[in-house]
Image (cartoon, grey):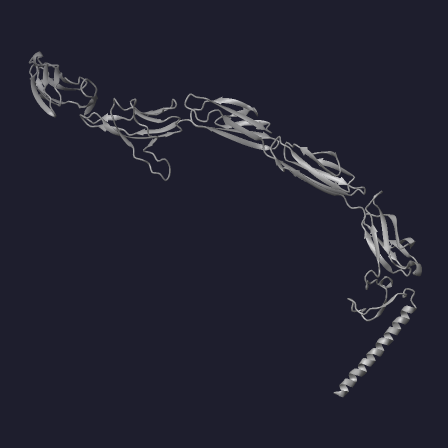
Amino acid sequence: MNQVLHRIKINKVILGIGLLLMAAATFSFFNNNLYSAELAYVERSNDPLVEGVVIPASCESNPVQDHFANDCQCSVTASACGGGMCDKTISWNTNFNWATWGRASLYKDGVLVNASVNNVGSAVHSIPLAGSTFRLRRPDGVTICSAFVAGLPPPTLTMSVSPTTINPGQSATISWSSGNATACTASNAWSGGKATGAHSEMVSPASNSSYTLVCQDAAGRLVSRTVNVTVNPPLVNLVASDYHIGPGDSTELSWTTVGATTCTASNDWTGAKAVNASEFVSPTVTSDYDLTCSGPSGVTTDSVQILMPSALLNATNCTIAAEASSCLSAVRWRSFNFIGTTSVRQNGTQFSTLGIRGYSPGWPIPATGPMSRAINPDNDLLTIKDTGSAFELSVTPVASCAAGSTWVTGSAPSRCVVIPTMTITSDPEIIRNGNTAEIGIAVTSNYNLTCTVRGGVPATSATFTHNGTVSASSTRTITSLPLEAAQIVEVYCEADLYPAVNATRDMRIRVTPRVEEI
C-alpha cells in the first residue's frame, strides 16, 4: 500500500514538472511572436483543447476563437443596393489594436481594395450579381472577420386573378406585385407595358384566356407569371308564357342569351333562331323545345316542355243476349296533364270523375279493375274529357246482338229481338201440268206476325197471321192453284210490334210438261 501511494506522489510531481515546462515553452514561443502581447491562461473553457493553457487574445489567434466575452469585436456589414446596378456601403467595426500592431487591410473577393483601414470605417463598392465576400485581414494575412454581401436581388413577381371563372360578359381582376423590377410587359390575352410594383387591372375575356406578365431587372434578368380565366359557356334562358295549355291554345316562347353568336332550335321545333327573340307555338301534344346557342366560350342548350292534355280510353266489345237490351263493357281510362278535372261520360252523361281506372299509376302500385258499363247500339259512345280545356277522347265499343236476333228501336223497349224462323215445303215437290200441290208453312216467333204468301196460291189464302208467344210455333197448309209451269212460292212474315223484325222464305214447285199424243 505504501508503495502505491509513493508511486502516486511521484507521478504528481512528474506531472507538475511537465506542466511547468510546457508553460515555459509556450511563453517562449509567444514572446517571440509579434501578436503575443495579450496572453491569457485559460482555466476553464468550452473548448477542451485550450483549457489549462496560455493563449493569446482571440483577435490575435489563428484561427480566431472567442474565449472571453467581446475579447475580439469585429464585424463587416453592408447597406442595401443603391445607385448603378448595385452599389452598397460596406462598413466595418473592430477593436483590434491597430496602433500597436499595424493597420488591417480590406479585401473584396480576395483582391485588396484598401491596404490600411481604421478600426471603424466604410466605403462604397459595386456588388456583382453573384455577390462578394469582404474580409478584414491583419498584417500577417490572418482574417479577423468577414461577410458575404449579396448582389442585386433577382426580380420577383406574384400574380393572381379573382374570380378564376366568370360568365360571359363578366369581368375578373388581375393583381400583380413585382419587386426589383425595372419594367413589366404583358402577353397572351393582354399586351403592352404594365407598371412595376403592386397594381391590378380588370379584364373581360370572351373565352378561356391566359394572361402572362414578364418583368425584368436592371441586369436583364426575367421573371414570368401566368394566370388563367375560365369563361363559362354562353348563358341561355328559354322560358314560356304558359307551360300547360289545351288543344287550340298557344304559348309564347322567349329566350335571351349572353355570349352567344348563333342559336338553333331542335326537337319539336327547328331552324336557326336569333340570339334574343320570342315565338308563339301551338303544339297538339306534349312537346319539348330545345335551343342550342354557341359562342366563343362554348355551347349551351336550354329546354322547356309544354304540357298538353292526353288520355287513354279503352272499352271492350260485348254481345247482347236475345231479348236483352244491353251488355256489359269493361271500361278503362287514364288522364294525363289535364288542366281541369276528369269527366268520363257515356253518350254525354258523366258517370265518373276519377283520373284513372283500370290502369296502374306506376310501379309498385297495381292497376285498379275496369269499370263495367251497360252498352247497346243506342248507348255506346264513351268519352273522357278535360273540363279545363277542349281536350276529349272518345271510343265506341261494339255491342252486337246474339245470333238469331236483331237490334230493334221503336215504341217498344229497344232490345235484341229474336228473328222469326220459317220453313216451307211442297207436296209433292213435282206435279203434273195442270195439277195442284199442298204447300206446308211452319212459323216460329215470339211475336204476332202477319204473313203474306206470294205466287201460285189463291187470293183467299194469300194472307195469314201467327199468334206469337215465347218460342210459339204454328203450321199452315195451302193448296196451290193448278200449275202449268214451275212456280216460285214466297212467304213473307212481319212482326206487328217490330216492323223491322221480319223473315222471308221461298220454294220452287216443279211441274212436268204436258205430253200430247200425235
Quadrant of the snapshot with the C terminus:
top left
The answer to which of 262 and 76 lies nearer the viewer is 76
Can residue 132 be seen here? The reply is no
Drawn side of residue 81 relative to residue 431, left or right: right
Can residue 11 be seen here? The reply is yes
Q: Position of residue 429 (x, y in %)?
A: 10, 21
Q: Position of residue 201 (x, y in %)?
A: 69, 34
Query: What residue lies at 9% left-to-right and 12% top-to-bottom?
Result: 459
- Identity of the residue furthest to the bottom in this view: 2
Drawn side of residue 259 relative to residue 402, left or right: right
| Quarter where residue 507 is shown | top left
The answer to which of 334 and 160 lies nearer the viewer is 160
- In the figure, 386 relative to 138: above or below? above
Query: What residue lies at 81% left-to-right and 70% top-to-bottom?
Result: 43
Q: Position of residue 179 (x, y in %)?
A: 75, 42
- In the figure, 232 relative to 415: above or below? below
- In the figure, 31 relative to 148: above or below? below
Q: Position of residue 331 (x, y in %)?
A: 29, 30
The answer to which of 55 and 501 lies nearer the viewer is 55
Quadrant of the snapshot with the N terminus:
bottom right
| Quarter where residue 54 is shown | bottom right
Q: How many marks?
A: 0
The answer to which of 129 and 438 lies nearer the viewer is 129
Drawn side of residue 389 relative to residue 484, left or right: right
| Quarter where residue 86 is shown | top right
